[in-house]
Image (cartoon, grey):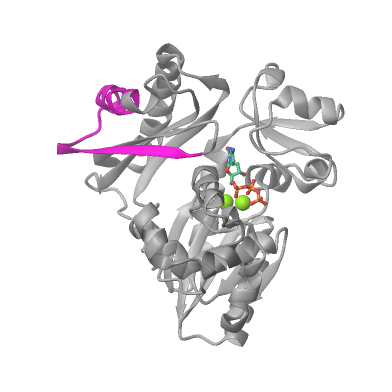
């Protein structure tokens, strides 16, 4: 089985702020959705580990965070800066010329092929120091025999860590963890599994694959294999780099289409600013809704022609998101464009 290397930046937005404002280091810091003046009305997007030790976390109302820590340092979301830093992180990671998939703004996974553990660990350390020296940002790296396990061992090694999970240790690493720790298993699936007396990944590994398949379809079989140390996930090159998107959490959960429309308008505008800057036409439009239980739904539409119209992006975005809301409250919405085509004379991907 080949090796995979997963990188996830530590407290990414807040770390970007610390990197350009070193005086913020060592003290609790949160980055939130609102301006400084309106800081108590928004939610925390992320916070450094000093703040986490006080119980502050992503998606917590900022007012609550200030209750937990009245001296909390606060910075408003500056996504343009974080996007730029993200681009530089990804450039560093891709500079090795290995097959790389950008998973989110602060995450990427690499297919190391037949590389051995020693060399993989060396590469992990090289990337960590390069990212830290060039950009002043900490990250954590996980190395394992599957894409999913590399991410899981990365999560388990945070912050500023490097974890190697060898093939022979995967099953014992997974055994006592709750099923929700297995990527892709959300609260809903966990509840259904609990009804079947399955609470740990070890329980899942011992379950009957046919029963799982009958309850959950092909995903049932996949989770059974994952629980048993078999991870067939592939690295898909440039998956996220080929789309430009923005998403944002609401101050409170909402099903009000007017609120959602206003947010979508703002996000569509921000997406188009970036698309304009990078000089693309786009053909694909995607939206996403995240619900209070953290499950998500997405909807995509492919247009028949390339466009660069913000108005079209907004109106189709609204059309796509409406059925996802449909009297359900949402916590977060997002919009993105994909199938990008560089305009003449400008740099291509
Ligand atoms: N983010 C957000 N709203 C959330 C969660 C995350 O806006 N509810 C943003 C801010 C994070 C970035 O996405 O910095 C990356 O998310 P991660 O889940 O990787 O979290 P962090 O990088 O902040 O922390 P960690 O060290 O746990 O990875
Ligand atoms: Mg992160
Ligand atoms: Mg992440």
Q: Outermost residue toward the left?
A: 304
Height in image: 59 above or below 254?
Answer: below
Q: How many marks?
A: 0
Magenta run includes residue 300: yes
- Residue 202 in the image: state x and y as whole percent: 60, 67
Quarter in which the C terminus is drawn: bottom left
In the displayed structure, would residue 21 be above or below residue 147? above
Q: Quadrant of the N terminus?
A: bottom left
Identified at 34% across, 51% down, the residue is 242
The residues colored magenta run: 295-322
Q: Is residue 278 above or below residue 308?
A: below
| Residue 306 placement (x, y as % from top left) | 18, 38
In the rendered image, which quarter is residue 73 located in? top right
- Picture layout, residue 269 above or below residue 299: above
Assign ligand 1 to one image quadrant.
top right
Write the residue at 70% across / 64% down: 157
Q: Nearer the viewer, residue 343 or 29?
A: 29
Q: Is residue 92 left or right of residue 284?
A: right
Q: Position of residue 340 (x, y in %)?
A: 27, 46
- Side of 104 where 137 appears, left or right: right
The answer to whether residue 239 is seen in the rendering is no
Q: Nearer the viewer, residue 148 or 71?
A: 148
Kindly tell me whether residue 191 is visible in this rendering.
yes
Q: Looking at the image, which residue is at 57% across and 57% down?
A: 198
Question: Residue 297: within the magenta?
Answer: yes
């Amino acid at each position: 089985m080949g090796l995979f290397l997963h990188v996830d930046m530590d407290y990414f937005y807040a770390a970007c702020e610390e990197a350009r404002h070193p005086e913020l280091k060592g003290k609790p810091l949160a980055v939130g959705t609102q301006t400084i003046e309106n800081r108590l009305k928004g939610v925390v997007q992320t916070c450094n580990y000093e703040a986490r030790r006080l119980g502050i976390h992503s998606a917590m109302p900022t007012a609550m965070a200030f209750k937990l820590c009245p001296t909390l340092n606060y910075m408003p979301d500056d996504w343009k800066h974080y996007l730029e830093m993200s681009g530089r992180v990804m450039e560093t990671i891709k500079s090795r010329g290995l097959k790389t998939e950008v998973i989110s703004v602060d995450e990427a996974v690499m297919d190391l092929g037949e590389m051995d553990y020693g060399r993989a660990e060396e590469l992990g350390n090289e990337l960590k120091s390069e990212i830290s020296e060039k950009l002043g940002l900490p990250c954590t790296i996980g190395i394992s025999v599957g894409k999913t396990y590399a991410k899981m061992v990365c999560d388990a090694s945070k912050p500023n860590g490097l974890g190697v999970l060898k093939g022979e240790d995967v099953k014992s690493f997974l055994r006592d963890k709750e099923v929700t720790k297995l990527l892709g298993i959300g609260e809903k699936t966990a509840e259904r599994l609990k009804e079947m007396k399955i609470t740990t990944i070890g329980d899942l590994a011992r379950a009957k694959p046919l029963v799982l398949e009958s309850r959950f379809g092909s995903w049932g079989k996949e989770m059974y294999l994952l629980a048993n140390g078999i991870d067939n996930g592939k690295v898909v090159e440039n998956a996220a780099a080929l789309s430009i998107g923005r998403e944002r959490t609401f101050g409170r959960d909402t099903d009000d289409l007017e609120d959602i429309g206003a947010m979508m308008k703002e996000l569509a505008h921000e997406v188009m600013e970036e698309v304009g800057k990078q000089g693309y036409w786009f053909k694909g439009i995607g939206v996403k809704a995240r619900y209070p239980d953290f499950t998500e739904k997405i909807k995509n539409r492919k247009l028949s022609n390339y466009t660069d119209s913000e108005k079209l992006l907004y109106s189709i975005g609204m059309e796509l998101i409406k059925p996802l809301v449909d009297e359900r409250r949402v916590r977060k919405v997002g919009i993105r464009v994909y199938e990008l085509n560089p305009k003449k004379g400008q740099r291509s991907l």
